[in-house]
Image (cartoon, rainbow, N blue to C red):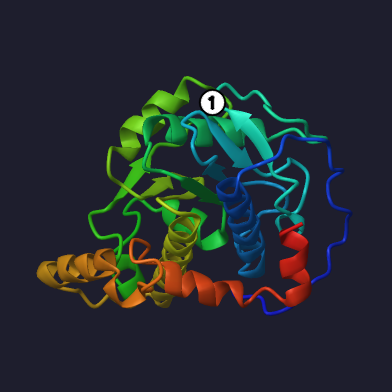
Amino acid sequence: METAERIAPAQPAAPKASRPAMSAAERQVREDLAAAYRLVALYGMDDSIYTHISARVPGTEDQFLINPFGMLFRDITASSLVKIDLEGNIVEPSEWDVNPAGFTIHSAVHAARHDAACVLHTHTVAGVAVSSLAGGLQPCNQWALQFHNRVTYHAFEGIALNHEERERLVADLGPTSRALILRNHGLVTLGRTISEAFILMHNLERACRVQVAIQSTGQPIHPVPEEICELTARQYESGDTNRLAAQPTDPYAREWRALLQRLEPASTAAYRA
């Protein structure tokens, strides 16, 4: 459910430890990632202090940014994000640690999929419900058709603390999928940009909500012909209607710019801090 209410941070920002000067590219990634955390909270897709969004540090293959464990998503700032490597080592000074389960999932994806600049994981009611259905995500609505034959599944193995699970998770994800359903657990999306990962998750979440709503009626689902399912998926993939002239390689730039407007000026200043 979308939440229009803006809530002022209830806790102070993370203490700022001294860190090296960062590039403009890293600063932009930090600001976009902090905005994505706050948008996840705004749209009701967060789960207390759990779940995670990570983004690769520009110019690296083995470092990524992730949330400080214990901070609510609505309070994440660019400077509070924690930089870690693929071994889970914190590589810059921070007053925070990271969620071990978050490290397991995100390190596996970032290590195997170099096209994944951002990885987003949620535990929403609708997402967990669909992940727990034997049939998984069904081609029963337009949002779901974006993922037609493009979503993969990974079996539940308990809380993701066992590093040996990473190999199986990556194998189930495959080389091209941008959406992974963790059985009995939740949803994962991958993006070449932070905007892509967020918008894919927003659409996947809405697809799950609609499916649960349809199934709750007990009525048969009106079928969509296979050729129309594939056509719709390809239409989403093209992204032509969303491109901006200034960012022609990012098919999600237009919607991302609009989504950032959901964050009030005071919140915008806070997450960029």
Q: Is residue 6 left or right of residue 244?
A: right
Q: Quadrant of the N terminus?
A: bottom right
Identify the residue position indicated by label 1 in the image: 86
In the image, residue 239 lies at what x, y percent? 30, 69
Q: Quadrant of the C terminus?
A: bottom right
Residue at x 50% of width, y 28% of height: 62
In the image, residue 221 lies at what x, y percent? 28, 74
Residue 6 showing in the rendered view: no
Residue at x 46% of width, y 31% of height: 61
Q: Is residue 68 left or right of residue 242?
A: right
The foreground one among 26 and 202 is 26
The foreground one among 163 and 224 is 163
The image quarter containing residue 250 is bottom left
In the image, residue 81 lies at what x, y percent? 70, 44
The image quarter containing residue 12 is bottom right
Residue at x 87% of width, y 61% of height: 10
In the image, residue 100 lies at what x, y percent? 64, 30
Q: Secondary structure at mark 1?
A: loop
Query: Is 20 drawn above or below residue 167 in the view shown?
Result: below
Residue 91 showing in the rendered view: yes
Query: Is 160 drawn above or below residue 3 in the view shown?
Result: above
Question: Hey, what amino acid is under mark 1?
Answer: Leu
The foreground one among 215 and 263 is 263
Q: Is residue 272 left or right of residue 173?
A: right
